[in-house]
Image (cartoon, helix red, strand yellow):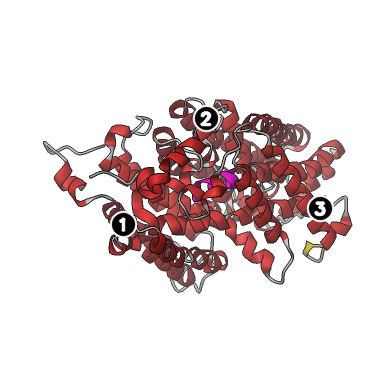
Amino acid sequence: MHVATATEYSGPEDEVVRAEESKLRRHLGVWGLTAIGFSNIVGSGWLFASMYAAQIAGPAALLAWVAAGILCALVALVIVELGASRPEAGGTVRWPLYASGRLVGSVIGVSALLSVGATSAELTAIVQYAGHYLPWVYKDGSLTWSGVLLAVVLSVILTALNWYGVRLFGRVNNTLTIIKIAVPTLTVVALIASGFHAANLTGHGGFAPYGYGAVLSALAGGGIVYSVNGFQAPVDFSGEARDPRRTVPLAVLGSITLAVLLYLALQLAFLGAVPETLLGHGWHGVDLDSPFGELAVALNLQLVAAMLYADAVISPGGSAYVGIAIDARHTYALAKNRLLPRPIMVVDRRSGVPRRALLLNLVVVIVFLLPFGGWQHIVSVMGDLYLLLYAAAAVAAGVFRVVEPERLSGWVPGLRVIAPLSFVLASEFIYWSGWHDLRIALPLTLAGVPLFVALWRTDRSAPLLTELRRGAWLVAYLLTLTLLSGLGSFAGANLLPAPYDSIVVALVALVVFPVAVRSGVPRSRRPERATAGGRGPR
């Protein structure tokens, strides 16, 4: 027996899948993929993350950025391995199906589909920042109907730029990425040259005024981990990459490194530029509506301030541009998974773009932009759903390591240890999203269960009990995370206080991971039977 393949879940129409896959254009190299990853990581959040981190940890926030880079790199190693050894457009929603069956594939597929809300949130952010110049588009904390119309126009433009091929997409994104690097870099240089106070790093309570435990609090509470997330983007383009076994790993790890270096520089510049008058109550008391913009104005850097307000539109615009492209690859892959009608996966032969998937996503984005009562809060939390892709990818890597070790790329030695560690960290990232988000996001993903039942009735590629056995761990895992979130310290009831709540989440993940891997491995290929001479796959 072997691990599930595309053939098993596509049936006799698998030739159609291969035919569509062959139309994709493999034009993306290392720089193009790295720019995609960087642009997906760095949105408008860079304008605020430095202040939030400083409020929690003071100058020790610098250590939190280093820790976030290391943690995200550990999670990314699993993504790197899968992207290098199993390159496929929209691979992050295909691998869970192969490794864990249709129930897991359906639940993860629903989370990927709903995470389109993150792109809608970026478009909303663009219009909100544009309200600085166009006050009639944003009022009383939400978009006006004029603002909604502007966001819809922007979504149409970004979709049109994705319409004509991955090569054009790469060129436009490369330009946006250069701007997204240049403006923060100029901000750092200007602030350090004009008003850097080295005493801020050791005064006002010292380098770690709230203790080194605050560094861990800043990882989640300060939004640092989430500022570095989004690194999986190059993997979803692995089916359109040149030499993916080489380019995808370099792009994923390169985009994380580039983003962390930028965030470190911004954090250092912010810490040194805060005036003495704002530190009377310590770093907790530093609260600015537009942190870097106000500091630039205070230092009489009017040109820098103008660039910052302009980049507040460009940065989320670049993230939304990449988000629309990623969403289309996910939708294309979901059609291959039969979670969506098969005609949606058609790839235009001339451009190599899944245009029908792009159009479907445009409709979803527009619906998510409509200002229904309470709707925007629901949409804003949907961006957390992509974190489930990390957890499912770790399980898939664990399954593939046992079942098909000969396909490993060699980029990630020690996958036996890294895969469970990645699953634990992904679980922590999900948990740190907080109860206010998870109480909506996680139950929404369970809509994949009735979808799975409906699909099984029309496509019985495996017995129902077999599929339930392979995927039950994910349902139990989601319910447990929801319960722990409600009891925990991240906007929950605090019946399980910090840091014990995060410790419990880690222990739960360590218990769930081997169960999930074992559920995906055929009985005849489980390690105790498949290994020889006391050695198993690495």
Could you give the CA–CA distance between mark 1 and mark 2, rounded to whole angstroms? 33 Å
* Residue 217 visible in the picture: no
Range of the magenta residues? 326-334
Camera-side residue: 122 or 342?
342
- Magenta stretch: helix, strand or loop mostly: helix
- Residue 309: image x %, image y %? 80, 44
Find disc 1 in the rendering and name its residue: 462
Q: Residues within 10 Å of mark 3 (few under 14, many from 20)?
A: some
The residue lying at 31 percent from left, 42 percent from top is: 400
Q: Residues within 10 Å of mark 2 (few under 14, many from 20)?
A: many
Picture quadrant where residue 471 is located: bottom left
The residue lying at 44 percent from left, 58 percent from top is: 106
Amino acid type, mark 3: Leu
Amino acid type, mark 1: Ala
Find disc 2 in the rendering and name its residue: 241
Q: Is residue 375 above or below residue 62?
A: below
User: CB under 8 Å between callouts 2 and 3?
Assistant: no
Disc marking residue 150: 3
Considering only order in the chain, which callout, 1 or 3, is on the residue closer to the N terminus? Answer: 3
Determine whether the residue tagged by mark 2 lies in a helix, strand or loop: loop
- Residue 487: image x %, image y %? 46, 72
Disc marking residue 9: none
Q: How many marks?
A: 3
Is residue 133 highlighted in magenta? Answer: no
- Residue 138: image x %, image y %? 82, 59
